[in-house]
Amino acid sequence: MVEPYLPLGAFGPIPDLRSYFNAVMWRFRTGSPWRDVPESYGSWSTIYDRFRMWARDEVFQTLMHAMIDEAAARDDVDLSLVSVDSTVARAHHHAAGMVVAPELLEDLEKAVAEEKGLQQRGETTL
């Protein structure tokens, strides 16, 4: 499912394209510095360069939208799986006063209310 959204090189398919993608995912999953990406994925600098190109070309944005669209087509969107820990993800000061679609806001408020209810009962969502 990922390969169709990864860009081709100027002269055709890029060797080990999936490996580069896995390396980028490994780096963000672990939170490690780029230099700590395992050598089995290839040179860290090549992986970083590929990540920068993909970010510039909005490859990750396109992939995310495709995954959401596929899940929605299967009616498999579950906002109860969304969890943001404010100690890790902080809103930028430009995010103050952000406008959210009313139906999305309603779904998010329901998810927050459910989470608060679970926390008050001593249950967790994990």
Image: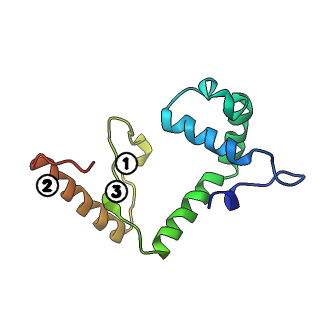
Nearer to us: label 1 or label 3: 3
Instruction: List x then y, in percent, for residue 32.
Output: 53, 28
- Amino acid residing under circle 1: Ala
**Mark 1–mark 3 distance (CA, rounded to whole Å):** 24 Å
Instruction: List x then y, in percent, for residue 34.
Output: 61, 28
Q: Residue furthest top?
A: 35
Question: Mark 2 or 3 closer to N-term?
Answer: 3
Nearer to us: label 2 or label 1: 2
- Amino acid residing under circle 2: Gly
Whether residue 65 sits left or right of residue 79 in the image: it is: right
Marking on residue 117:
2
Colour theme:
rainbow
**Mark 2–mark 3 distance (CA, rounded to whole Å):** 15 Å
Q: Which residue is mark 1?
A: 96
| Residue found at x 62% / y 59% | 62
Q: Are marks 2 and 3 in contact (CB under 8 Å)?
A: no
Q: Nearer the viewer, residue 11 or 90?
A: 11
- Amino acid residing under circle 3: Leu
Q: Which residue is mark 3?
A: 81
Instruction: List x then y, in percent, for residue 15.
Output: 80, 46
**Kind of element beneath mark 3:** helix
| Residue found at x 60% / y 24% | 36
Question: Mark 1 or 3 closer to N-term?
Answer: 3
Quadrant of the rendered structure where residue 26 is? top right
Instruction: List x then y, in percent, for residue 64.
Output: 55, 58
**Mark 2–mark 1 distance (CA, rounded to whole Å):** 26 Å
**Kind of element beneath mark 1:** loop
